Amino acid sequence: MSRRYTRVDDERVEQLTLRGLSLTRIAEIMGCSERAVSRARKRIGVAQPIPRWMTPEEIALAEQMLDDGASLTEVARTLDRHPTALWKRFPGRGWTSEQTGQYNALRNLEARLEL
């Protein structure tokens, strides 16, 4: 059995990587596998995305969302950032383990009620 591999556009992978997009996000945008993106990055010599600094506007929005009770994960999704970046930037902020458990229990109950 032979396999067909589609070569991805290295230039596009480089552009998206330099914009700070993750391997997973680039694969979604380009409609290919994460492995294909990884190989392209290796071919062009860009193994890791260059981290983007948070802008003052992003920091203000993150602080406002956290003050309003949003989780760090929710803030990270909104800003298209990795949660670890926010955990490092805002130590001690976000939800406790107990709050996360309560939220998950509420979501489970909500899902059962929608049946």
Image: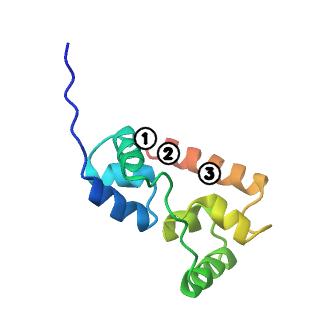
Please state which amino acid type lies under the numbered disc 2.
Ala
Residue tagged 1: 115
Please state which amino acid type lies under the numbered disc 1.
Leu
Q: Nearer the viewer, residue 21 or 70?
A: 21
Q: Toward which corner of the image does residue 11 lie, by quadrant?
A: bottom left
Residues tagged 2 and 1 counted as in contact (Cβ below 8 A):
yes
Please state which amino acid type lies under the numbered disc 3.
Leu
* Chain-order first, disc 3 or disc 2: 3
Q: Nearer the viewer, residue 90 or 49?
A: 49
Left or right: residue 113 compared with residue 66 = left
Left or right: residue 46 compared with residue 40 = right
Q: Secondary structure at mark 3?
A: helix
Residue 29 image offset from top left, x and y in percent? 30, 55
Residue tagged 2: 111
* Chain-order first, disc 1 or disc 3: 3
Residue 8's tag is: none
Look at the picture and state if 3 lies above or below 1. below
Residue tagged 3: 106
Q: Secondary structure at mark 1?
A: loop
Determine the residue positioned at 55% across, 66% down.
51
Nearer mark to the viewer, of 2 and 1: 2
